[in-house]
Image: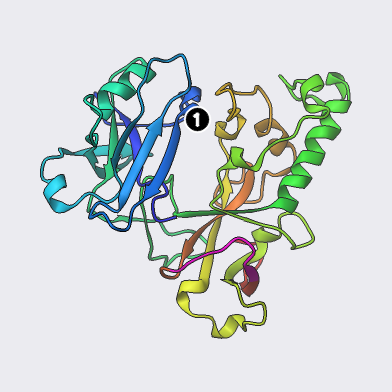
């Protein structure tokens, strides 16, 4: 997760961060991290594009050195009203075109690929963790997003139930009943860093304050080191981005946003009129996570959860 949201694409005129909320086909861009521990650059981020757009594949350094960065322009970028510093990336050979030129062709407007700059970006405190001290990169607000397969299954059941009924019964405008009667919603639509299963009930993550992640099933959560502890700081309120089909870049008119609005509003005390899916979180220190690690609840959130 070290490279998660380390880069973003910004409008070249306003320096505002561009997301798939406004530009659906952004999800069709294929980023690939290629580590190289023998290189002073740590490897490279390789960016490729779907066929038919006339855009060549390019790569940028994964961890550019100070000598590299002194030749990169640093700019101030805006995201949700916050100013975030970042470097305008330059391509590694053999590409002769800059990332800005290639991406501008794809977007049909002048843009830049930007890597997060050196200034720490503090996470905003939450109602549940008013003394929160953590930093993040180009995420909307927090470095981690946690969701469970049980929660997705419950949402999927709600979608199927709505789709088999008539439009007059469900009152969900734009719902494609034929598609979603049997269609599956992939977890990738929600872009979680960590996906869990085994809690036994949907939305169990809403009630956790601290969890411990370890390959050791017998580890006592109370004795776990900070790097194995993750703090859930708030529920994640949802916009229309998960409606964008990651295979086509086309935004669905109803799923999952309008379905979530039917049963997942009023869950976040800070945003009672917004729906929630998954939880925002921060980590206690650097560590390694493995597929198949065990998760234990260390402390529970009170009241209505995180």
Residue density around tag 1, few if under 14, some if 14–19, many if 20 or more, within 10 Å: some
Disc 1 element: helix
- Residue 44 visible in this rendered orientation of the protein: yes
Q: How is the image coloured?
A: rainbow
The residue beneath circle 1 is: 27
Q: Quadrant of the C terminus?
A: bottom right
**Displayed quadrant of residue 190:** top right
Residue span colored magenta: 287-295
69 vs 180, left or right, is left
Q: Is residue 256 left or right of residue 101?
A: right
Q: Measuring from the top left, give residue 5's x and y in whole percent.
A: 40, 45
Q: Which of the two residues, 215 or 259, is positioned nearer the viewer here?
A: 215
Residue at coordinates 45% horizontally, 65% vertically from top-left?
130
Q: Position of residue 269 (x, y in %)?
A: 59, 53
Above or below, comparing residue 301 to residue 61 in the picture: below
Indicate the position of residue 162 as horizontal and vertical percent values.
Answer: 83, 30
Q: Is residue 290 magenta?
A: yes
Q: What quarter of the picture does the N terminus occupy?
A: bottom left
Q: Name the foreground residue: 240 vs 86.
A: 86
Residue depicted at x 78% and y 46%: 154
Residue 14 can be seen, yes or no: no
């Amino acid at each position: 997760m070290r490279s998660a949201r380390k880069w973003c694409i910004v409008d070249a005129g306003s320096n505002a961060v561009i997301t798939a909320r406004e530009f659906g086909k952004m999800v069709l861009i294929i980023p690939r991290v290629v580590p190289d521990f023998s290189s002073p650059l740590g490897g490279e981020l390789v960016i490729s594009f779907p066929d038919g757009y006339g855009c060549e594949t390019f790569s940028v350094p994964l961890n550019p050195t100070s000598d590299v960065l002194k030749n990169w322009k640093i700019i101030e970028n805006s995201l949700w009203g916050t100013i975030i510093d970042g470097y305008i990336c330059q391509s590694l050979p053999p590409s002769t075109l800059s990332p800005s030129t290639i991406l501008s062709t794809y977007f049909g407007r002048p843009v830049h690929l930007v890597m997060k700059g050196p200034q720490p970006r503090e996470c905003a405190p939450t109602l549940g963790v008013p003394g929160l001290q953590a930093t993040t990169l180009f995420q909307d607000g927090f470095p981690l997003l946690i969701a469970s397969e049980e929660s997705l299954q419950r949402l999927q059941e709600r979608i199927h139930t709505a789709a088999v009924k008539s439009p007059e019964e469900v009152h969900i405008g734009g719902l494609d009943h034929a598609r979603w009667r049997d269609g599956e919603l992939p977890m990738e639509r929600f872009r979680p860093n960590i996906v869990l299963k085994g809690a036994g009930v949907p939305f169990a993550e809403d009630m956790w304050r601290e969890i411990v992640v370890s390959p050791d099933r017998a580890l006592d959560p109370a004795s776990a080191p900070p790097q194995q502890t993750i703090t859930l700081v708030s529920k994640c309120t949802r916009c229309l981005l998960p409606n964008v089909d990651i295979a086509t870049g086309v935004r669905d008119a109803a799923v999952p946003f309008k379905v979530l609005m039917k049963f997942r509003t009023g869950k976040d005390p800070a945003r009672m009129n917004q729906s929630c899916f998954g939880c925002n979180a921060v980590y206690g220190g650097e560590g390694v996570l493995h597929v198949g690690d065990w998760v234990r609840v260390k402390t529970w959130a009170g009241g209505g959860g995180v």
